Amino acid sequence: MLEKVDLSKSIGEKEYRKLTEEYSIRLGELQRKAWKMDIPIIVVFEGWHASGMAEIINRFLMPLNPMGFELYTAGKPCAQEEKKPLIWRFWTKIPKKGEIAIFDRSWYRRALLEHFSKNISEKDTNNCLNGLTYFEKQLADDNYLIIKFFLHISKERQQKRFEDIRNKGTPLFLVKEEEEDYIIEYDKFLPLIEKMLEKSDISHSPWNIIESDDLNFATVKVMASFIRAVEERIDREEENHEKAKTKATQTCTIPALNTSILEKIDLSKSLPKDEYEKEIKKYQKKLSKLQYQLFMQDRPLIIAFEGWDASGKGGGIRRLAQALNPRIYRVVPVGVPSDVELAHNYMWRFYNEIPEAGHIAIFDRSWYGRVLVERVENLCGDQEWKRAYREINEFEEILSNYGTIIIKFWVHIDKDEQLHRFRKREKTAHKKWKITDDDWKNRDKWDLYADAVNEMLQKTSTTYAPWTIVEGNDKKFARIKILRTVVETLEKELKVK
């Protein structure tokens, strides 16, 4: 990709001033228009050291309203970032609708320094590249505009700029030790960069190679490329808006499935009280020891609970938490998203909650709301919940590749048992708060939810994040199955007997 780039391109000072003045006005106009149309924009700057990146970024920023963009510099990971997957630190920085996030070096630089340049396995390298691809595709599918620039200069030009900087008596670069080789060994990193660019040059987020031997030419090309990309997106949005006016509104239809996983579950399973008390002590004792093995091995653990209203999720979570050190675990209750969360991609709030290495996050409901309540209640479009199966599997794959242990429970009860528990809550003073009008409304759509659950279980139970269905009509049986599943999974993953 880089060997064909003509680095001799340049532009005269007079033409540069004329074009940048014209482009600056257009940049400001497009920023305001994208904000009004709720189009989130991500701009990535990558390139060689001494490519003039800081100067070019600064020139690019000058016409923009600083209230509408955020600039991030991707340096060496901090202690918290080192304990989470690489892509986490960038997921948490994606812009809200209508705003712009500009990355001065990005996930590609970090992947290059943390993965590609080290002697790691081809499998780990591919996993890393796949994670970056998933990240960009999920954002692109959610209407994020991703514009990527690679500032390319020749080895000779780089060396000449290094010499100029030294002659001025200023520090070469404010860089970390890990980047010293990247600065010096141009030939070593060239094939790695070529591979990175080729693997990540995708239709929804293509690379713009910027010839940067001449800074004025590079600046003009960056501005022109940004303007073209934003104009094309705005034109497409306006065209789609006009088409939507002539289309009848489509409602979320849930097809009946040929098979039902839920219908095959034996809800008659139960556990005598004396056996329950014996088993709960045994498994809570084991779990108490395993949490420290998890911590020592730096393995994150995610336990996600989904299930019918009143199915006993809260009781199962409490029996787990009783055995855990509060410094190591936390419970993440997932409710109606806030305005800030709605202004981001729907996975953003869940990436913000993933545990660091050695810690535990227990989700009381989770990202599966997209294919359950949001699907059934028409809170998102058909295309959004349909593609969510793939996006969720990719999310869990990224976590698993990092070493995260993922345990997912669907707590199942039948309709009669749910009615019994609803009535009991209404009659118990300290439990009345648990029953709401929404619970009764959801119950009226039992069959629709059942179809959604069946499809969810079929499409998102993977080798790295399988579903465990918990027979929940008997609470004692359910709680022990949850504890036993967690203990046995940890023993297997941590290789503890």
Image (cartoon, rainbow, N blue to C red):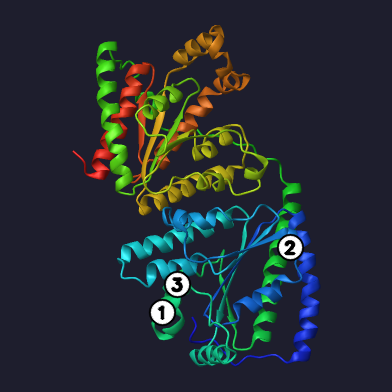
Sequence order check: which comes first, mark 3 or mark 1? 1
Q: Nearer the viewer, residue 433 or 418?
A: 433
In the displayed structure, 142 sits above or below 479; it is below
Q: Around disc 2, counting alpha carbons within 10 Å, would you say few (fewer than 14), some (14 to 19), or many (20 or more)?
A: few
Which mark, residue 156? Answer: none
Please give the residue where the numbered disc 2 appears in the rendered image.
66
Comparing labels 2 and 3, the label whose residue is closer to the camera: 2
Please give the residue where the numbered disc 1 appears in the rendered image.
181
Comparing labels 3 and 1, the label whose residue is closer to the camera: 1
Residue type for callout 1: Asp
Residue type for callout 2: Pro
Q: Nearer the viewer, residue 269 or 445?
A: 269
Horizontal side of 496 relative to 193 (left or right) equals left
Q: Around disc 1, counting alpha carbons within 10 Å, would you say few (fewer than 14), some (14 to 19), or many (20 or more)?
A: few
Q: Quadrant of residue 120?
A: bottom left
Q: CA distance from mark 1 to mark 2?
A: 35 Å
Sequence order check: which comes first, mark 1 or mark 2? 2
